[in-house]
Image (spheres, rainbow, N blue to C red):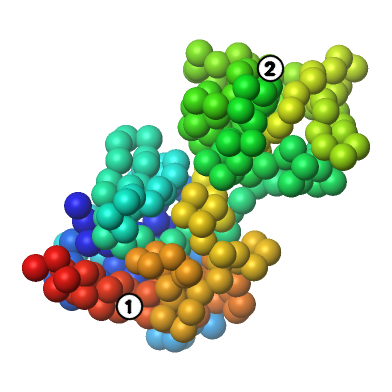
Amino acid sequence: MFDVVIIGAGPAGISASLYTKRANLSVLVLYSGESNVGEAHLIDNYYGFPGGIAGKDLYENGIEQAKKLGVEVKNVEVLGVHPKEDETFMVKTVEGNYDTKTIILATGNRKVKPNIPGIRKLEGRGVSYCAICDAFFYRKKKVAVLGNGKFALSEAEELAHVASDVTILTDGNESPDTEFKVETRKIKEICGEEKISKVVFEDGEEFELDGLFVALGEAGAGDFANNLGIIQDGENIRVKEDMQTNVKGAYACGNVTGGLLQVCKAVYEGAVAGLSAVQYVRGKNEVSK
């Protein structure tokens, strides 16, 4: 059981890890892929770098700093975050699960929405972005998952406990290694009036279904927020001044909270989230004594 698990290794997540580790908590940082800051060619408006610094260098320096302090950092894809009955959390990854007293979401907002005709119109009417949230409504019904990565397979496994029929739709991409039925043809459009009724492939063939779950790329902060019942304002996670969400022990910082998308804001919010998590864990430990 970790005191803190932080998802994201950009400026917000690493900042949070430094403050929680210095408070003598057990800290795990999980990340996969590049941070938004790592994609910046040159950052020349951040304090302390008169000649600017490449985003990739700033990103890698932050991870190295956390490791030198003793923070455990793992490059692994996170599939989901789930609340437990004792008000702790379970973080599911492709390599195993981790239990933690607090969770800090600092992934940036990476939700991928496909540009398929008809899909936006049917969001909330058969098109969903969260299997854990909506699987219940598709008991003994035919559903499909749009995607071909490990996130998509995880969503399909969740749905398999409820739905009568689950198919993976890759929309022209490579088929994953799975026992689920897979359809690799390119999708032309998503159809339905009051609710989704079918997917039409580019060759004109139709695939009838009751629900479509979008799981492209990797899970992001919005997906984790949905898992936990965290309130969002559009694409952004709603937080209080101490960076805590509406869920006790769950914090968010950086680009996931919206506003100024700058390194300085991410570092500040990471520090606040980290210090808030420290106080929460210490209070929880006192109660358990």
Q: Is residue 271 above or below residue 4?
A: below
Q: Earlier in the sequence, mark 1 or mark 2?
A: 2
The residue tagged 2 is 183
Nearer to me, 270 or 66: 270
The residue lying at 81 percent from left, 34 percent from top is: 196
> Which residue type carries mark 1?
Ser
Lateral position of residue 190 relative to residue 237, left or right: right
Where residue 176 sits in the image (x, y, percent)? 54, 21
Q: What secondary structure is found at the residue carrying circle 1?
A: helix
Residue 51 in view of the camera: no
- Spot occupied by residue 46 in the image (x, y as percentages of width and height): 48, 82
Please tell me whether mark 1 or mark 2 is closer to you in this view. Answer: 1
Question: In the figure, is residue 121 to the left or right of 81?
Answer: right
Query: Which of the labelled discs sits on residue 276, or is there none?
Result: 1
Q: Residue at x 58, y 36 (%)?
A: 136
Circle count: 2
Q: Residue at x 18, y 61 (%)?
A: 26
- Residue 96 % position (x, y): 30, 36
Q: CA distance from mark 1 to mark 2?
A: 46 Å
Instruction: Give the quadrant of the C terminus.
Output: bottom left
* Along the line of sight, the residue nearer the viewer: 260 or 137: 137
